[in-house]
Image: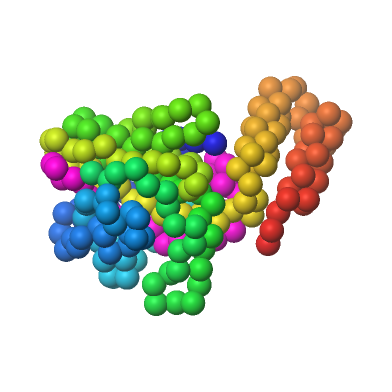
Amino acid sequence: MIIAIPQLLTSPQVQEIRAALDAAAWIDGKATAGHQSARVKNNQQLQEDSPTARRLADIVLAALEKNSLFFSAALPAKIFPPLFNRYLPGNSFGVHVDNAVRQIKGTAHRVRTDLSATVFLSGPEEYEGGELMIEDNYGPHSVKLQAGDMVLYPASSLHKVQGISRGARLASFFWIQSMVRDDSQRTLLFDLDTAIRKLNADVREPGPDNGAIVQLTGIYHNLLRSWAEI
């Protein structure tokens, strides 16, 4: 499942993050690449344990906590602290698959990467190229969203970032360990939750007096109870 989450970050939050990134020191993006990814990765990123990276990560994490669409789609158990990268003209990231497990630097904590996430911090008009290309069973999908928007997709997907020819592409990226590791099960739960929310919004008498909605809600939670790993 590939899903866009609009306006995860507000415009003031994007501006605050970008001001900090403009003043930050950047390092080679290969610092967090696996063996295979390092061969095709050509970008820059913030040092992941720097004070600036940690402060900006907290802004993203706080926004995630308030976003019901993110929770419904990801069913997060653990979130790898958000990182930040920059693509300039000539930069790109070739086809790769994200590492299955990531260790949080300086700790013993590990995160299984069920889902990958990219939060766009530059508007599409600010740079040429830089599309995030994600492949699934239906072929390649090109993603280039507004600043503040996020895309969520299975970390097992082949994906790449197209080369930049103009401007700068700024983004935050991270991984999520879901309570439900199977993507098809997460998709089913997300579709069911979306349908229940729509029914609650549409019916004249939502809530406990509507037997059908209560029954569907029970099915959702029984499926989640069967599939969740906590």
Measuring from the top left, give residue 172's x and y in whole percent. 34, 51
Where's the N terminus, which quadrant?
top right
> Residue at left 41%, top 36%?
134
Measuring from the top left, give residue 24's x and y in whole percent. 18, 61
Give the left or right position of residue 167, taking residue 215 as reference: left
Magenta-highlighted residues: 69-91
**Can residue 9 be seen in this snapshot?**
no
Check residue 122 for magenta coloring.
no
The front one of 168 and 98 is 98
> Residue at left 36%, top 30%?
142
Measuring from the top left, give residue 151's x and y in whole percent. 43, 40
Q: Give the answer, above or below, for where 193 lies relative to 28.
A: above
Q: Write down the quadrant of residue 90 in the picture.
A: top left
The front one of 112 and 209 is 112
> Residue at left 62%, top 51%?
181
Where's the C terminus, which quadrant?
bottom right
Q: Give the answer, above or below, for where 71 lies relative to 207.
A: below
The front one of 103 and 135 is 135
Measuring from the top left, give residue 180's x and y in whole percent. 65, 51
**Can residue 113 be seen in this snapshot?**
yes
Q: Write down the quadrant of residue 89 in the picture.
A: top left
Check residue 83 for magenta coloring.
yes
Question: In this figure, which colouring scheme has been used for the structure?
Answer: rainbow
> Residue at left 75%, top 22%?
204
The front one of 209 and 224 is 224
